[in-house]
Image (cartoon, rainbow, N blue to C red):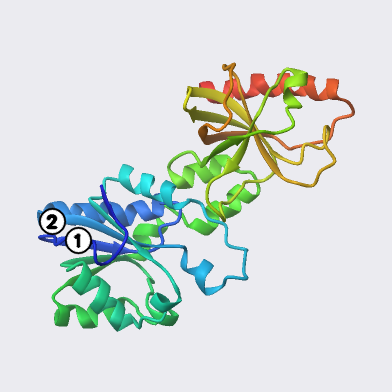
Amino acid sequence: MQVHYSLESFPKLSFPVVTTGTFDGVHLGHQTILNRLQELARKYNGQSVVITFHPHPRQVLRPDDHSLQLLTTLPEKIARLEVSGIDHLLVIPFNKEFAELSSQDFIRQVIVEAVNTRKLVIGYDHHFGKNREGSFEHLRQFGPQYGFEVEEIPAQDIDQVAVSSTKIREALSRGDIHTANRYLGYAYPFNGKVVRGKQLGRTIGFPTANLELEGLGKLIPANGVYAVMVNSGSGIFNGMMNIGFRPTVSDEKVRSIEVHLLDFEGDLYEQNMKVKLIARIRDEKRFASVDELRDQLKLDRVQALKYLSV
């Protein structure tokens, strides 16, 4: 997949089959659109093209509203679209000036002049342009004028998988990893760098890597202990992760993400780590003593290995 970061850098293609949207999570609902995109690209011997935006439009249009929690950072979104088999990804820098484009200007400047779209595929109830004034009817009206055809994915085709980014965010916020992963079609990931913590885990036989996430606005699931798969510079490992405030060993009110590798000994500091959430083991809780915490972690380890062996 070729990635382009400006309208000016987008190449001249013979038959671009295009879709556009934020595609946060690149979940199974999105896959319905992407699969149709590639089906048409093959039919016309053309190229599949996804147009997306960065930052997320809501982060620009509502800068004081921090309620938006993203399922994917830009690098994660790019990786998921590449796995989907897309030929070209155009990442348009979204700013207030771009947000002022009318729907007709968006069609003319982006869809037509920059990308030379021949066929456009959109999800039902798709809106675009200033104040989201553009719609399927708008596209169908201007398509003949600008030389492209537009196809809307029917509501029932997407509703059949009953997936939306909102449903996935809700599942993650309550710690329902099983539902979130089922809707995503893959294990929910974290990417970040290992930074130094207080090394309290070493004192009880469960050393942890403190993870500093890349990107702002990434959704962090509910506090608790999770079974995870970890990919670092040292290899791929089974692990368990704690999200929360570590109430047994700390009175701090800073939420942390700590990963314990089940089959690794060594130094992970400053390494980049990719963590995939497989299952939730339990809630985070305060134990009466460090010894009681250690005993529970031993049970958590057994449970994590059961989840990871499936």
Earlier along the polypeptide chain: callout 1 or callout 2?
1
Mark 1 belongs to which amino acid? Answer: Val
Question: Local crowd at mark 2 within 10 Å, few (<14), some, or many (≥20)?
Answer: some
The residue at the point 62 percent across, 71 percent down is: 64
Q: Which residue is mark 2?
A: 46
The residue at the point 23 percent across, 83 percent down is: 141
The answer for how far apart the CA atoms under marks 1 and 2 are is: 7 Å
Question: In the rendered image of this protein, does residue 20 appear above or below residue 80?
Answer: below
x, y percent for residue 218? 56, 52
Left or right of 7 on screen, residue 237: right
Question: In the rendered image of this protein, does residue 194 appear above or below residue 150?
Answer: above
Question: Local crowd at mark 1 within 10 Å, few (<14), some, or many (≥20)?
Answer: many
Contact? badges 1 and 2 (CB < 8 Å): yes
Regarding residue 137, the answer to whether it shows in the image is no
Residue occupying the far right of the picture:
288
x, y percent for residue 140? 23, 78
Q: Answer with the quarter of the image where residue 18 lies.
A: bottom left
Secondary structure at badge 2 equals: loop
Mark 2 belongs to which amino acid? Answer: Gly
Q: Which mark is residue 17?
A: 1
Question: In the rendered image of this protein, does residue 265 appear above or below residue 219?
Answer: above
